[in-house]
Amino acid sequence: MHHSTTDSSAGSSASLEMETMPIRQLVRARDVARKLGVSISWVIQHASGKRRPYLPAVKMGPGRSPLRFDPNDVEEFIEGCRCTAGRRTLSR
C-alpha cells in the first residue's frame, strides 16, 4: 500500500509542474516568414524537409496550414544559419 502512495504523490508533483510551466505560444508560417524576410512558401519548403537547412515545425493535423512554429526553434534556426554563414566566410 505504501507503494501506491508513492506513485500518487509522484503523479501529483508532475501535474503540479505542468500547471506552473508557461505555455509556449506557437506561431504560423506567415509570422516566421515575416521575421526571416522570406516568403511563406520558403518557410513551408524548409519546414517540410524539401529544402535545407531544415526549419523545425509542429504539424497540428490535416488542413490548409497545419504547421506551427516554436519561436525558440526559429531563434535557434537563425543562430544555426549565422554560424554556417560564418564558417563559409572563414573557409574561403
Image (cartoon, rainbow, N blue to C red):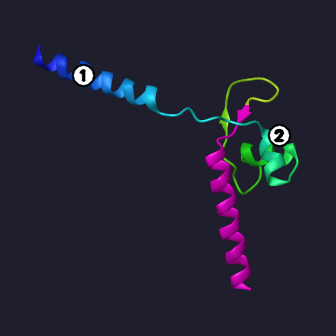
Q: Is residue 81 above or below residue 90?
A: above
In the rendering, at what x and y percent does residue 83 appear?
65, 69
Q: Name the outermost residue toward the top.
A: 1
**What residue lies at 74% left-to-right and 80% top-to-bottom?**
89
Image coords of residue 34 (percent x, y): 84, 47
Image point 64% across, 41% down: which residue? 70
Checking the image for residue 30, the label placed there is 2
Q: Kindly identify the amino acid type of the residue bearing the numbered disc 2.
A: Arg
In which quadrant of the rendered image does the N terminus lie?
top left
**Relative to residue 62, is residue 29 depicted above or below?**
below
Separation (CA) of disc 2 from disc 1: 43 Å
- Does 80 lie within the magenta span? yes
As drawn, is 15 to the left or to the right of 58? left
Query: Does the magenta stretch mainly form a helix, a strand or a loop?
Result: helix
Direction from residue 5 to residue 71 in the image, left or right = right
Residue 87: within the magenta?
A: yes
Name the kind of residue labelled 1 in the image. Ser
As drawn, the label of residue 37 is none
Q: Is residue 84 above or below residue 11?
A: below
Q: If you read the primary sequence from the N terminus, does the residue marked by circle 2 or circle 1 appear first?
A: 1
- Quadrant where the image shows the C terminus: bottom right
Q: Position of residue 11 (x, y in %)?
A: 31, 22
Depth check: give the residue in front, 90 or 2: 2
What secondary structure is found at the residue carrying circle 2?
helix
Q: Kindly identify which residue carries mark 1.
A: 9
* Structural crowding at the residue carrying mark 2, measured as other residues with C-alpha within 10 Å and reported as few (<14), some (14–19) or many (≥20): some
Q: Is residue 92 above or below residue 37?
A: below
Q: What are the residue bounds of the magenta stretch?
A: 67-92
